[in-house]
């Protein structure tokens, strides 16, 4: 063990090892590494702040545009209101038509579109009652369901 410590002392003596220079070199290297890491951190923080500021500006712009759109919708609703349309029509010389002034035009062969129905609509006759078409009670339905269930499991 003594020979080993002698070897280390001999190696340090021959290399002119100076601890002060190495400490200064390591401290300088640590300072530059800290400086680089700090610069990277500040760059990231500045980028994040810029992005957040731009996002806030865009959100404010969106809110302003939504507010303007709502004002325009209100204006459109006011302009297309029935009272306003009638007043504007009267200003242009239109007037309400009386029954005698209305002329209906009959077009031969014209059949207006009829709404599609699932089943043909059959009017009720005098003897039919709307309630007689459906006379099942809830308990009757429940009994049928129970019987069907018991039949399916073999009971």
Image (cartoon, rainbow, N blue to C red):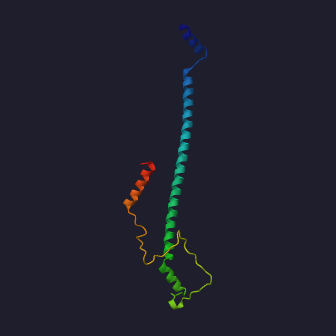
What residue lies at 49% left-to-right and 77% top-to-bottom? Answer: 81
What residue lies at 44% left-to-right and 48% top-to-bottom? Answer: 153
- Quarter of the rendering containing residue 114: bottom right
Spot occupied by residue 109 in the image (x, y as percentages of width and height) = 62, 82
Give left or right: position of 141 versus 101: left
Spot occupied by residue 20 in the image (x, y as percentages of width and height) = 54, 23
Spot occupied by residue 8 in the image (x, y as percentages of width and height) = 57, 13
- Residue pushed farthest bottom? 100
Give the answer, above or below, for where 73 lies relative to 1.
Answer: below
How many numbered circles does the render carry? 0
- Quarter of the rendering containing residue 4: top right
What residue lies at 42% left-to-right and 76% top-to-bottom? Answer: 127
Instruction: Out of 118 and 19, give the one closest to the viewer.
Output: 118
Instruction: Out of 70 and 48, give the one closest to the viewer.
Output: 70
What residue lies at 43% left-to-right and 54% top-to-bottom? Answer: 148
Instruction: Out of 77 and 35, give the one closest to the viewer.
Output: 77
- Residue pushed farthest top? 2
Instruction: Out of 41 and 143, give the one closest to the viewer.
Output: 143
- Residue pushed farthest left? 139
Spot occupied by residue 14 in the image (x, y as percentages of width and height) = 61, 14
């Amino acid at each position: 063990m003594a020979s080993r410590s002698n070897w280390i002392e001999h190696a340090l003596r021959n290399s002119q090892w100076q601890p002060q220079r190495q400490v200064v070199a390591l401290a300088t290297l640590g300072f530059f590494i800290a400086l680089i890491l700090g610069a990277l951190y500040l760059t990231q923080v500045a980028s994040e702040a810029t992005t957040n500021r731009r996002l806030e500006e865009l959100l404010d712009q969106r809110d302003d545009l939504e507010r303007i759109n709502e004002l325009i919708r209100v204006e459109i609703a006011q302009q297309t209101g029935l009272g306003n349309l009638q007043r504007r029509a009267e200003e242009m010389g239109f007037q309400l038509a009386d029954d005698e002034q209305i002329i209906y035009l009959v077009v031969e062969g014209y059949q207006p579109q009829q709404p599609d129905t699932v089943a043909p609509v059959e009017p009720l006759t005098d003897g039919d009652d709307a309630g007689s078409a459906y006379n099942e009670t809830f308990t009757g339905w429940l009994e049928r369901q129970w019987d069907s269930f018991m039949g399916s499991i073999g009971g």
